[in-house]
Image (cartoon, helix red, strand yellow):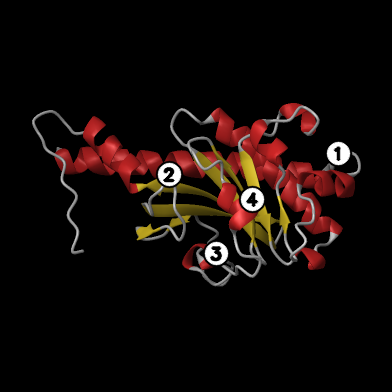
Amino acid sequence: IYVGERARAERELFHNFEAEAALAADELRNSMKHPVGDEARTFDAWFPDHGDGTRRSVLGLLDGDPKLDGGRVNHVAGFIGHARELTLRDKVLLLAAARAVARFGAANRDHIDNFGFETAKSRFVDYGTARRDRMMYFRTQMPADSDFDNDEISQLTTPRNDPQRAARCTQAHPMSFKVNGIFPMVTQCMQPVYLGNTYLGAFGESLYLDAYLGLVEQRTPKGAQSLIVSDR
């Protein structure tokens, strides 16, 4: 009974992510097909030149500034690497991603606190609500030459590594930066996004180990005890 209940709980987490990411992908594709106004100007306003070869999100995307998309985009931060190589299509994609993570992150904030989109050339936008640091690292402190295209999470759903176009998750590992003062253990699930046969990137969600521990405690079947065993 215990094993079955635990497996059910874990499947529910994964299937919830798959469903959310699939809906977000549909919205992203629709936004790319029907851009709103002058997307180049909007991109410049949302992700201004940081002066170091990158673009970073403005504070207004975090606070829901009504001057930016009517305040509908909030709790969002982004880091755009290789900024000098951006095309208009890249900008439309990243704007669509920012709108999608804001909408679906907010709609599911009762059971997730982050939802993001990552694409090639070290570019991503992320929705997060429980960060005391207000995602300062991404917005101001992340080194301009950061390159995570070859990281496990970036390679997880590429056409070469995921030809079935299925959602996949990493093994648990410590984050490369601090969240609320610590380097948390995390597993990251990614869902690839395609426009036709063109790979655009992937939506992702991080599940922090402390959050998982809380979930395990809440869902322990009656008469059972939850244990997490590690060889570290």
Mark closest to the chain's N terminus, 4 or 1:
1
Which quarter of the rendered picture does the N terminus lie within?
Answer: top left
Position of 81 with respect to 192 (left or right) is right
Q: Residue at x 83, y 49 (%)?
A: 44
What's the amino acid at mark 3?
A: Ser
Q: Nearer the viewer, residue 187 or 140?
A: 140
For mark 3, what is the residue? 154
Mark closest to the chain's N terminus, 3 or 2:
3
For mark 1, what is the residue? 36
User: Is residue 180 placed above or below 201 in the rendered structure?
Assistant: above
For mark 4, what is the residue? 139
Give the x, y percent position of residue 9. Answer: 30, 38
How busy is the neighbourhood of tag 3: few (under 14 within 10 Å), some, or many (20 plus)? some
Is residue 90 at least partly visible in the picture?
yes
Position of 66 with respect to 36 (left or right) is left
Q: How many marks?
A: 4
Q: Residue at x 73, y 61 (%)?
A: 54
Q: What secondary structure is marked by label 1?
A: loop
For mark 2, what is the residue? 180
Q: What secondary structure is marked by label 4?
A: helix
Position of 145 with respect to 108 (left or right) is right
Task: Single out the mark in the foreground, 4 or 3.
Answer: 4
Give the x, y percent position of residue 94. Answer: 73, 51
CB contact under 8 Å: marks 2 and 1: no
How busy is the neighbourhood of tag 4: few (under 14 within 10 Å), some, or many (20 plus)? some
Q: Residue at x 31, y 43 (%)?
A: 210
CB contact under 8 Å: marks 4 and 2: no
How busy is the neighbourhood of tag 1: few (under 14 within 10 Å), some, or many (20 plus)? few
Q: CA distance from mark 3 to mark 2?
A: 24 Å
Residue 130, label in figure: none
